[in-house]
Image: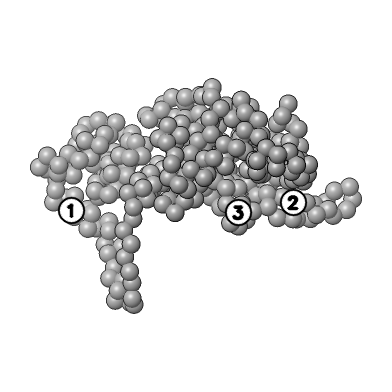
Amino acid sequence: MSQSEFVASPSVVALAGRMGVDLADVARSADRTHIAREDVERHAGGTGGGSTQTASAIAHDSRYWEVDHAAFGPVTEEPLSKFAKVASDNLSAANRMIPQVTHHDRADMRAVEAFRSSLKGEAATRGIRLTALAFHVKALGVCLKEFPRFNASLSSDGSTLILKSYCHIGIAVDTPHGLMVPVIRDIDRKGLWQIASDIADLARRAQERKIRPDEMGGASMSISNLGGIGGTAFTPIVNPPELAILGITRSDVVPVWENDSWVPVPMVPLDLSYDHRVINGADAARFLARFAALLADPRLMLI
């Protein structure tokens, strides 16, 4: 039985990987196409069967990683936190199951920067830092309304597309205890000031590990912003059950041919990873072109 003939959630795939279990074998022995955690555990010998085969599979799969690193020089060991292990399992399963493609583009940030500069006084009065990220979030909310297949999820068996009427954006936050993705709710109902305030609040509380469980999950789509660190492009991993994720890196001034001359223009690189089972390349290109157009003229996202 091939992988296309059975269905398993990312967590079940991750469990099978840890236990060295072949899901195709599980599907054959269980005589079913929808594989659950109990099927994997039973196949691995949880009820008394298959333990020798499982141990052999684990040894075979991990032999390349079983290296005595200390033989080559001094080492120290640092156990992964529970938080990091969960993230590792989820990302590994997502990367294995999703046929992911990344589309790259860039956006002219002149209008956004000019607008932000004109609002410095009001921002100081409000006590809110109006970052470029707030504009990215707002533009993404507009695009999700105009391209509903991006604001959707696949059912666990991959047979039904669930289209969402709400618009929530996850913001990846780098913290000392691992990556967290708190969610800003109802982007389509909020203005730039409220979005900027929400971003700052969630980022601060993520660093302090004060994000509530109800503030995680349920995002329409997520943003991974590396602009404050650097880089020119990367390939963010789609976070299921979302179907796409937007990556942002540091803006750079590049020459653009405009009105018969070269003009220095601040451009931000954009990296859109998407699930090719639902979204095709032309859709992704149109989505990101519209996103770039909104940033080039932010008045469009306020209409």
| Residue 217 visible in rendering | no
Amino acid beneath label 3: Gly
Marks 3/1: CA–CA distance: 45 Å
Mark 1 — residue? 55
Q: Is 39 situated left or right of 143 in this image?
A: left
Q: Of tags 1 and 2, which is closer to the observer?
A: 2
Mark 2 — residue? 266
Amino acid beneath label 1: Ala
Up-down relation of residue 65 to residue 21 (above or below): below
Residue at 76 percent across and 37 percent down: it is 297
Mark 3 — residue? 228
Q: Earlier in the sequence, mark 1 or mark 2?
A: 1
Residue at 25 percent across and 30 percent down: it is 32
Q: Of tags 3 and 2, which is closer to the observer?
A: 3
Q: Of tags 3 and 1, which is closer to the observer?
A: 3
| Image x and y of residue 280, in percent | 56, 36
| Image x and y of residue 59, in percent | 22, 58
| Image x and y of residue 49, in percent | 11, 43
- What secondary structure is found at the residue carrying circle 2? strand
Q: Residues within 10 Å of mark 1 (few under 14, many from 20)?
A: some
> Which image quadrant for residue 272?
top right
Marks 1/2: CA–CA distance: 56 Å
- What secondary structure is found at the residue carrying circle 3? loop
| Image x and y of residue 107, in percent | 70, 45
Q: Earlier in the sequence, mark 3 or mark 1?
A: 1
| Residue 84 visible in rendering | yes
Residue at 61 percent across and 52 percent down: it is 227
Q: Residues within 10 Å of mark 2 (few under 14, many from 20)?
A: some
Amino acid beneath label 2: Pro
